[in-house]
Image (cartoon, rainbow, N blue to C red):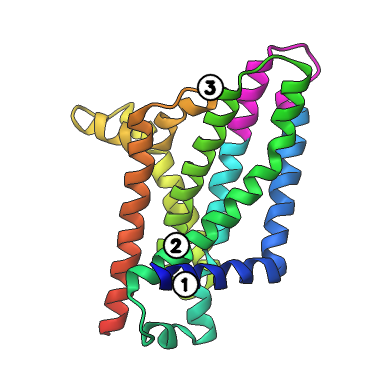
Amino acid sequence: MRNAWLLARRELGAYLKSPMGYVIVAIVLFVDGMLFNVWAIGSTPRLSSHVLKDFFAIATFMSMVSGVLLSMRLIAEEKQLGTLTLLLTSPIHDREIILGKFLSALIFFTGMTLLTIYMPALIFWHGKVSWGHIFGGYLGLVMLGALSISIGLFASSIARTQIVAAIAGGAIMTAVYLCYLGANVADPPVRSLMAFISPQKHLQWQTGVLHLRDVIYYVTGTYLFLLASTHMLQARRWR
């Protein structure tokens, strides 16, 4: 675990020193703020809880996009720079490499997400919303971000360049998300399986309601993609 944390600190420093991290943060905050004013608030009076729900719906889309963008460089950049071989031959396990890189992206993502707290704070100041709704919504965003990062990390482990990793990660994320469309036309028990796979069926936290099955979904999905990334590194080490 110590090696994973040291690697996480190194990768987190790379986010803070490179312009790419700040560009992603700026884009996320700009899009969230613009859509919050145009769509969530709008021009007609609305209930504060509905405005907050729409804010989390906006942040959901940006969390999936930013999670993939933040993780696209984690392994693919090592391949481009030619440092992956050095990393794989160092005295650190593959699972620690994956965990360290995942934690760095998750910490950066969490900090970026918390920068949007001023929007729910405005709703709280001018209306009536519960702290539970805000807390549940942000916890859901972090769990969704963790899933998106793990998908992007897996894509980065199989791609040769960051651009290909971003495209592959976006394609996997889109395919997983759109499984709910297949659930509408599939027969049981495939229907239940496809409905469970899609994040679309696990967004109750947007209303402040966090079910145990949703937590299990995000934790399990994140673990499976991190495990797949670890196996990809192991396969490369053997080659």
Q: Is residue 189 left or right of residue 97?
A: left
- Up-down: is 1 above or below 36? below
- CB atoms of marks 1 and 2 within 8 Å: yes
Q: Is residue 210 left or right of residue 231?
A: right
Disc 3 marks which residue? 207
Find the residue positioned furthest to the right: 43
Going by the numbered disc 1, the residue's amino acid type is Ile
Q: Quadrant of residue 73?
A: bottom right
Disc 2 marks which residue? 153
- Up-down: is 192 above or below 168? above
Q: How many marks?
A: 3
- Up-down: is 228 above or below 119? below
Secondary structure, mark 1, is helix
Disc 1 marks which residue? 75
- Up-down: is 28 above or below 232? above
Q: Quadrant of the N terminus?
A: bottom left
Going by the numbered disc 3, the residue's amino acid type is Thr
Q: Which mark is residue 229?
A: none
